[in-house]
Image: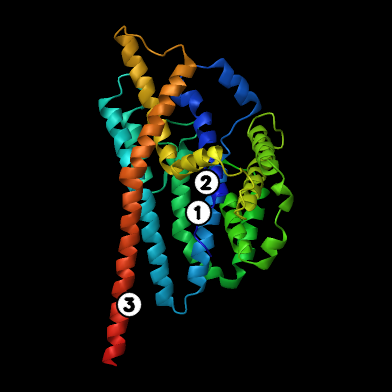
Amino acid sequence: MSSKRIMDIEVLRAIAVLGVLFHHLQGSLFNDTVPLLEKIHGWAQPWWGVDLFFAISGFVIARSLIPALQGCETRLEYWHQTRNFWLRRAFRLLPSAWLWLALMLLACVFFNRSGAFGSLYANLQATLAGVLQYANFRFADSFFHYEYGSSFVYWSLSLEEQFYLLFPLLILLCRKHLVWALLALVAVQIFTLRTPLLMVVRTDALALGVLLAMWSARPGHQRWQPTFLRLPWAGSAVLVVVGLLMSFMATDRFTLTSYRIGSIALLSALLVWIASYNRDYLLPAGGLQRLMAWIGSRSYGIYLIHIPAYLLVRELIFRLQAAGLPSPAGHPMVTVIIALGLIVLLSELNYRLIEMPMRNRGADLVARLGASRAAVSSSGATSC
């Protein structure tokens, strides 16, 4: 399966992270109620961006990992492929995640006069949960009970890390029955009432993404291609309609709450299915697509950075007010612009200085391990 970047997938990543950024404006950037945000949240809430991320992750990971693992002829070869996958994921995700955990903890100690970053005790516990990848369970336990800490978004990262750890083992255990195991995983969750614990281990969108990746390798996938979306902006219209529908489902106005997460997972998978054809259905080539692709390529860093950036802006505004200096307090749009500018700057620096260098190091390490293994095999064959 080709690992070439799919532009529509990057567009979906951008939409997912922008939705999360907007959702966290109230409560993270603005501690006081902003009437306009309250009105919008009454009719539309874009926290479903996290579920869209899950569907994308399931699809992107599975389209390369499953063929690689299914092509293994021995257990040792399967282990080497799994080890390489884990190493690439670790170098891709952990350096940035740990860096921003450390920076938030430092901000809590040294730049927290307003209390925006929360208490030191909560942040110490949250940092430990983020490093050890159980943040989702801590988040469920703390839900409306006690302070989580400023790194609360790490719950979804922990869930994805757990998926990356267990998915190769699931492929090994289920073998030819993998499709049925994934379908069962989706079906059980769709019809289950989501408690706080089940909300932070929701894997239906991830499983649907994996199923899409498996289907995309079969001839039937091309036969079901939505060619009608070739009409000018037809795919973009579908994207807007589905996004608005999920935003409405995420509000309290949607009464079928038992089916909320499952329905959002299915709609997220629908968008990933359209994107999987790599035909620019969702957004035609052009300046807007390039902008969204840039956001999508930096979406991981943006996701990590947006909360500390919001809290940093709050702290700066507090200090300006305390010093009697002009501040953007009382001007929400100015505050948003400052926060977004900070996020753009920090995410670009993170991408260039942390993400890409560490990703390349991971790829180099995997290549060296492969070369070393090949050399040992060749040496063994020669001696025989």
For label 3, the SS is: helix
Residue at figure coordinates x 31%, y 88% from the top left: 381
Answer yes or no: do the residues labelled 2 and 1 have beta carbons within 8 Å? Answer: yes
Q: Is residue 236 left or right of residue 309?
A: right
Residue in the foreground of this view, choosing between 104 and 215: 215
Mark 2 or 3 closer to N-term? 2
Q: Amino acid at mark 1?
A: Arg
For the residues marked 2 and 3, what is the alpha-carbon distance in whole angstroms? Answer: 35 Å
Q: Position of residue 204 (x, y in %)?
A: 60, 51
Task: Report whether residue 132 is seen.
Answer: no
Residue in the foreground of this view, choosing between 43 and 128: 43
For label 2, the SS is: helix
Q: Is residue 1 above or below residue 97?
A: below
Residue at figure coordinates x 66%, y 26% from the top left: 43
Q: Is residue 380 above or below residue 58?
A: below
Residue found at the very far front of the displayed protein: 286
The image quadrant where one finds the C terminus is: bottom left
From the image, tell me which residue sits under label 2. Answer: 10
Q: Is residue 221 above or below residue 294?
A: below
Residue found at the very far right of the displayed protein: 228
From the image, tell me which residue sits under label 3. Answer: 374
Mark 2 or 1 closer to N-term? 1
Mark 3 or 1 closer to N-term? 1
Task: Report whether residue 320 is seen.
Answer: yes
Q: Amino acid at mark 3?
A: Ala
Q: Residues within 10 Å of mark 2 (few under 14, many from 20)?
A: many
Residue in the foreground of this view, choosing between 346 and 171: 346
Residue found at the very far bottom of the displayed protein: 384
From the image, tell me which residue sits under label 1. Answer: 5
Residue at figure coordinates x 42%, y 13% from the top left: 329
Residue at figure coordinates x 37%, y 38% from the top left: 348
For label 1, the SS is: loop
